[in-house]
Image: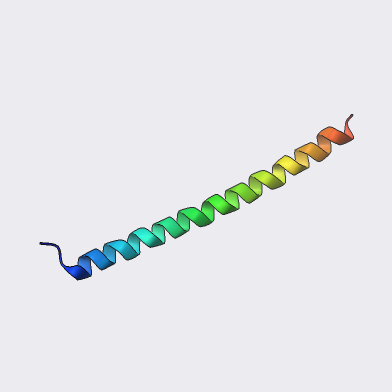
Amino acid sequence: MVGLETIVTLIITVKSAVDSISTEVKESNADLSRRTEQQAVVYCSNE
């Protein structure tokens, strides 16, 4: 049988991984948004 300490450790590890993924997604979305805005400025200035 799995002990309570093992389950708590697993939950903490999973939460940490989820937090890391969440941070990476937010940073990636911000970067994509910034690049899209830059491309829109370039596109509009070429018309």
Q: Is residue 12 above or below residue 41?
A: below
Q: Please report the residue visible at 38 percent of the width from the left and 61 percent of the height from the top.
A: 15
- Residue farthest toward the left in the current orientation of the protein: 1
Question: Is residue 46 rendered to the left or right of residue 34?
Answer: right
Q: Position of residue 19 (x, y in %)?
A: 45, 59
The quadrant holding residue 43 is top right
How is this picture coloured?
rainbow
Q: Please report the residue visible at 61 percent of the width from the left and 47 percent of the height from the top.
A: 29
Q: Is residue 47 above or below residue 35?
A: above
Q: Please report the residue visible at 52 percent of the width from the left and 57 percent of the height from the top.
A: 23
Q: Is residue 8 above or below residue 37?
A: below
Question: Is residue 12 rendered to the left or right of residue 35?
Answer: left
Q: Position of residue 14 (x, y in %)?
A: 35, 58
Q: Please report the residue visible at 23 percent of the width from the left and 64 percent of the height from the top.
A: 7
Q: Position of residue 4 (x, y in %)?
A: 19, 69
The quadrant holding residue 8 is bottom left
Give the total number of marks visible in the rendering.
0
Image quadrant in which the C terminus is located: top right
Image quadrant in which the N terminus is located: bottom left
Q: Position of residue 9 (x, y in %)?
A: 27, 66
- Residue farthest toward the top in the current orientation of the protein: 47
